[in-house]
Image (cartoon, grey):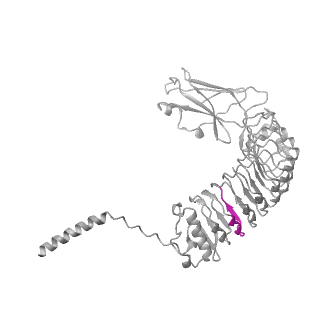
């Protein structure tokens, strides 16, 4: 009897186990919501705002969410800085936040710095205007398409970056931020600056690169505190005469526009230290450029400038970098201009000497037993400010191992290097001379009327 009962028990347990296998797996209970009632470091409303931020922006998938919703000390959570028992700063750069910023962000009323650049945020709530203590705000490199008009109510804001967002327009209230000292609007689809820009009288830096601006409003003259104005990669064809009112400017960046002439009033910008005018349509420069005696960096390359370099430029005795390659400017063989140019440490010019023919560069590639090395690829490079070495042309050695490049500038401000390419790698040790890169190669200088040989 005892044995029978034991067998029956085994049978029952086996049947029961099989039946249980068909039942659905019990659902795990969701973890309990974070309880801000246990937090004492900051007000409960601020804690709840942080929780809402985490939940609205997919906090579980942030790159770094150390401490968030796992400890009751939010001042130690990654990116959170507290002062006087309030959240003062949120720094979550490049942290894979995504989605919409929650309305609860407005409950962080003591926030002075909000740094959320380099994420995937799609929208900002109107409640952002509650952050009246905010001084520093960046949403650069996100997925914003619009901005709430309430952003214009951030009356303490000093720094604002909205660069690299797909904004179709900017709210007019943005120009009410009269306390701004820095405004960054790279690549935000701007086609014009409104006259209301004149309200930003405290502005010291204005960055408007990579937009579609064709003109600047006359009202820009009111930005008299401005010391940096950057307008690279736009579609400007002229500058307003009012730009001459910006007498505090020390840096003016105008690379890659279509500017053909500079207004006479441009001569008032005598405090300029950096002036970028390269990649424009300038055919001449005003003689008054010699008045810019504070200039240290001057970029004029890639303009249709022609003739002799103006002698008035020799007054620019502070220049440490000067570029004018990809122009037709020539340098007199003797006199003050070549003497002045010779004293500039970083000089990238055309190499054209007024009245002199172009130079040439030739050489030969041979084996150690003087046997010619035929059909070796030879690349010609010249020095530029960017890229550091620009490829000009390519040839191959002839049957007797020689090569030649013609039509080369031969004066101040241009260096040439040749690079030999041997796909078999059999000849490299014999003609690289332990200098395998352009940067380490021997500089080849071409002097007037004298063809120079290359590296044998």
Q: Residue at x 22, y 69 (%)?
A: 12
Which segment did they paint magenta?
Answer: 126-140
Front residue of 452 and 316: 316
Left or right of 352, for residue 52: left
Q: Residue at x 57, y 62 (%)?
A: 57
Coordinates of residue 183 in the picture (x, y in percent): 73, 57
Which residue, as the protein is rendered here, is positioned at the far left?
1
Q: Give the percent coordinates (x, y) of residue 116.
A: 63, 61
Along the line of sight, which residue is nearer the eye, 124 or 234?
Answer: 124
User: Seen from this angle, which residue lies furthest top?
Assistant: 399
Question: Does 104 sit above or below residue 259?
Answer: below
Does any portion of residue 201 appear in the rendered image? yes
Q: Is residue 441 magenta?
A: no
The answer to whether any part of residue 246 appears in the image is: no
Q: Front-most of 68 and 317? A: 68
Q: Pick whichever, 127 or 438, lies toward us.
A: 127
Image quarter in which the N terminus is found: bottom left
Q: Is residue 25 left or right of residue 50?
A: left
Q: Is residue 384 above or below residue 404?
A: below
Q: Tell me the quarter of the picture where residue 344 sits.
A: top right
Q: Which quadrant, please, contains the C terminus?
A: top right
| Residue at 12 percent of width and 73 percent of height | 3
Percent coordinates x, y for residue 42 in the rendering: 61, 76
The residue sitting at the right extreme is: 264
Residue 215's spot in the image, x, y percent? 80, 46
User: Image quadrant of residue 282?
Assistant: top right
Q: Residue 308: name its quadrant.
A: top right
* Residue 130 covered by magenta stretch: yes
Question: Exactly how many numbered labels are in the figure?
Answer: 0
């Amino acid at each position: 009897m005892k044995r029978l009962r034991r067998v029956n028990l085994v049978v029952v347990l086996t049947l029961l186990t099989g039946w249980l296998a068909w039942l659905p797996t019990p659902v795990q209970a969701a973890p309990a919501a974070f309880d801000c009632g246990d937090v004492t470091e900051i007000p409960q409303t601020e804690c709840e705002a942080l929780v809402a931020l985490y939940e609205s922006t997919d906090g579980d998938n942030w790159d770094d969410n150390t401490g968030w919703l796992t400890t009751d000390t939010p001042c130690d959570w990654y990116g959170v800085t507290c002062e006087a028992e309030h959240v003062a700063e949120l720094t979550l750069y490049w942290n894979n936040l995504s989605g919409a910023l929650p309305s609860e962000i407005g409950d962080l009323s003591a926030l002075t710095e909000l740094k959320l650049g380099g994420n995937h945020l799609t929208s900002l709530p109107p409640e952002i205007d509650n952050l009246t203590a905010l001084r520093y705000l960046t949403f650069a490199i996100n997925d914003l398409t619009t901005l709430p008009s309430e952003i214009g109510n951030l009356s303490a804001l000093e720094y604002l970056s909205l660069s690299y967002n797909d904004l179709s327009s900017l709210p007019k209230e943005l120009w009410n931020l009269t306390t701004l000292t820095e405004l960054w609007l790279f690549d935000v689809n701007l086609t014009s600056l409104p006259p209301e820009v004149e309200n930003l009288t405290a502005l010291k830096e204005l960055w408007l690169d990579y937009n579609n601006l064709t003109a600047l409003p006359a009202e820009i003259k009111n930005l008299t505190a401005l010391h940096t104005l950057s307008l690279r990669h736009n579609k400007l064809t002229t500058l307003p005469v009012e730009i001459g009112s910006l007498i505090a400017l020390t840096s003016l960046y105008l690379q890659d526009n279509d500017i053909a002439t500079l207004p006479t009033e441009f001569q008032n910008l005598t405090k300029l230290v950096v002036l970028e005018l390269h990649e424009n349509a300038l055919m001449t420069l005003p003689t008054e450029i010699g008045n810019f005696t504070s200039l240290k960096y001057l970029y004029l390359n890639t303009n249709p400038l022609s003739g002799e370099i103006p002698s008035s430029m020799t007054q620019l005795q502070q220049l440490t970098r000067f570029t004018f390659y990809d122009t037709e400017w020539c340098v007199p063989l003797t006199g003050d201009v070549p003497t002045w140019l010779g004293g500039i440490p970083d000089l990238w010019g055309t190499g054209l000497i007024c009245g002199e023919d172009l130079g040439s560069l030739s050489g030969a590639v041979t084996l150690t037993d003087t046997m010619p090395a035929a059909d070796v690829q030879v690349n010609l490079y010249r020095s530029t400010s960017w890229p550091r070495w620009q490829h000009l042309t390519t040839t191959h050695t002839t049957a007797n191992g020689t090569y030649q490049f013609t039509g080369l500038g031969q004066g101040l401000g241009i260096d040439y290097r040749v690079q030999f390419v041997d796909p078999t790698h059999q000849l490299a040790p014999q003609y690289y001379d332990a200098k395998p890169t352009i940067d380490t190669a021997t500089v080849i200088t071409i002097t007037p009327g004298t063809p120079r040989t290359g590296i044998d």
